[in-house]
Image (cartoon, helix red, strand yellow):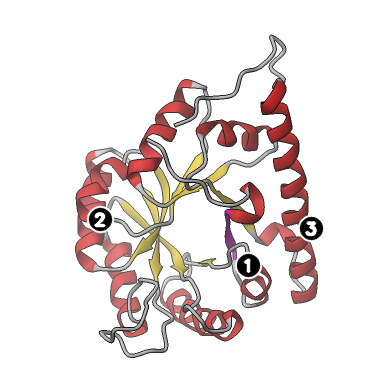
Amino acid sequence: MTGLADNRPDGTPTGGDARRLAELAANLATVRARIEAACAAAGRPPAEVELIAVTKTFPASDIVALSRLGIVDIGENTDQEAGPKVAACALAGLEPRWHFVGQLQVNKTGHVASYAHMVHSVDRLRLVEALGRRAVAAGRVISCLVQVSLDSTVRGSTGPHRGGAAPERVSELAAAIAAEPGLALAGVMAVPPLGEPARPAYARLRWIAAAVRAAFPQAAAISAGMSADLEPAIAEGATHVRIGTALLGGRRPFVR
């Protein structure tokens, strides 16, 4: 993984780091403008929408640069990649709010519980139990979102799926999270089905989120919307958008 940024004695970046900072600043301005426009169209204040920078495949130096630009919420898809970045940022004196947004394996819950502020992808009871146990052992309380499958195809078919619990299982998972001492139920998350329009899918998520919130009023978060579809997500009530490509550029091969 690429090292942290080289800076002048006054802390300002030099050379390529300065160019990258300028690139990220321009991209961030564009993304924030899109969020503001989407909120205006939906009649919502922009402060209702939290921007999570998904730094999958990008180096820790980009997280340092994003921190200079005021970004504190960082999303990662795998513990394999997140772990070294968490350590590098800690050495640099940075304490981002780490969001685990990818599919989480039970055998990775111990390490993820040591740093994650929020896990967006809780989709099965076994994961709830393991993550809760590990959070208690770490002396932490982790915010969790139930990942909802919005696929309209029949589950178990050979068609593509984006992960998540079937809608009829969401209330059971929400209750299990709320009952775990080391976990705090925060709401729901989803990605739109492959090959389908995003807006109808996010409308389904909004309905599911309302049902969860009726039972658990504190669970008001809706994590939905990525680089290509943040506008329909915000129109349907997203409170967290997970932005990678539009902010950081095209994905790179990850090097350990």
Magenta segment range?
239-244
Instruction: Give the prevailing secondary structure in the magenta stretch.
Output: strand
Which residue is denoted by mark 1 in the rendering?
A: 228
**Residue 248 in the image: above or below residue 203:** above
Q: Nearer the viewer, residue 50 or 77?
A: 77
Q: Where is residue 187 in the image (x, y as percent from the top left)?
A: 45, 66
CA gap between label 2 and label 1 equals 27 Å
Q: How crowded is mark 3: few (under 14 residues within 10 Å), some or many (20 or more)?
A: few
Residue type at numbered disc 1? Ala
**Residue 137 in the image: above or below residue 227:** above
The quarter of the picture where the N terminus appears is top left
Residue type at numbered disc 2? Gln
Q: Nearer the viewer, residue 151 or 177?
A: 151
Which residue is denoted by mark 2 in the rendering?
A: 105
The answer to whether residue 240 is magenta is: yes
CA gap between label 3 and label 2 equals 36 Å
Considering the numbered disc 1 on the image, is that residue within a helix, a strand or a loop?
loop
Give the mark nearest the N terminus, 2 or 1.
Answer: 2
Q: Position of residue 82 (x, y in %)?
A: 40, 41
Q: Where is residue 46 in the image (x, y as percent from the top left)?
A: 73, 60
Residue type at numbered disc 3? Ala
Quadrant hosting residue 90: top left
The answer to whether residue 70 is magenta is: no
Mark identifier at residue 33: 3
Q: Nearer the viewer, residue 84 or 218?
A: 84
Give the mark nearest the N terminus, 3 or 2.
Answer: 3
Q: How crowded is mark 2: few (under 14 residues within 10 Å), some or many (20 or more)?
A: some
